Amino acid sequence: PRAGLFSANKEGILGCVGYLGIHWLSVGLGAMINLPHSKRQDAHWIAKRLLLVAFLGIGSAQAFEMLGIRVSHRICNLPYAGLTLGVNSLVLGLLAFTDLYWPWPRRPMPHVYGGVQESMLATFLLANLLTGAVNLSSRPLLIPSWAALLILAAYSFVWSGVVGVLHARGLALKFW
């Protein structure tokens, strides 16, 4: 039963430590790959390291699974953190190799993408606050499909608009 604020959000509240750990691991991974003006050889080295991190992260999740510690996104445990870091590193590594061997030049990054890249934690927190506002103001599972789609479009427009405008103005919301 969801009697109070804590009981309605206990998984999210208790998982904050794990998600903060995933965030810090991701920041460390970002620092590892975000070298200024790296050369093409350095880019190959970074892509190989991303694939190594992917192998270690997914392998650690598999090892925990064999030890009987299941991956749980609800409590955001260590196997989940390893799996998340591994899968994201795998995607980044594959995208890095694709980028290295893609024959055409890249187009400029849209402001929304740049804003998310520059202010990831703030974007995540804003999206969570908006999700809470939607859940408190309506019953998303009980409303008609057209209304749910309208709410989803407004939700997406608000967070992406805020993040895009901040990036267009050169502002980044982070404390490090």
Image: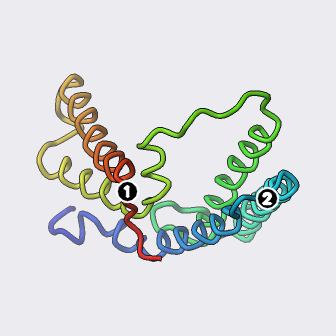
Quarter occupied by the N terminus = bottom left
> Residue 149 appears at what percent x and percent y?
26, 28
| In the foreground, 151 or 158 | 158
Residue 153, compared with residue 43, is above or below; it is: above
Q: Quadrant of residue 62?
A: bottom right
Pick whichever, 125 or 71, lies toward us.
125
- Is 41 left, or right, of 144 in this rendering? right
> Is 143 located above or below residue 130 in the figure?
above
Q: Position of residue 16 (x, y in %)?
A: 41, 72
As measured in the structure, the alpha-carbon distance from the residue carrying label 1 to the one carrying label 2 is 26 Å
Q: How many marks?
A: 2
Residue at x-position 50% and y-position 60%: 73
| Circle 1 SS class | helix
Outermost residue to the top: 146
Which amino acid does the dot numbered 1 rest on?
Thr
Determine whether 88 is above or below 109 in the image: below
SS for dot 2: helix
The numbered mark at residue 46 is 2
Q: Position of residue 79 (x, y in %)?
A: 64, 67
Residue found 28% across the figure and 49% down from its top: 162
- Residue density around tag 2, few if under 14, some if 14–19, many if 20 or more, within 10 Å: many
User: In front: 88, or 116?
Assistant: 116
Say few, some or many: other residues with alpha carbon within 10 Å of mark 1 (under 14 / 14 to 19 / 20 or more): some
**Which of marks 2 and 1 precedes in the sequence?**
2
According to the image, label 1 marks what residue?
Answer: 123
Amino acid marked by disc 2: Ile
The quarter of the displayed image where residue 80 is located = bottom right
Q: Are marks 1 and 2 in contact (CB under 8 Å)?
A: no
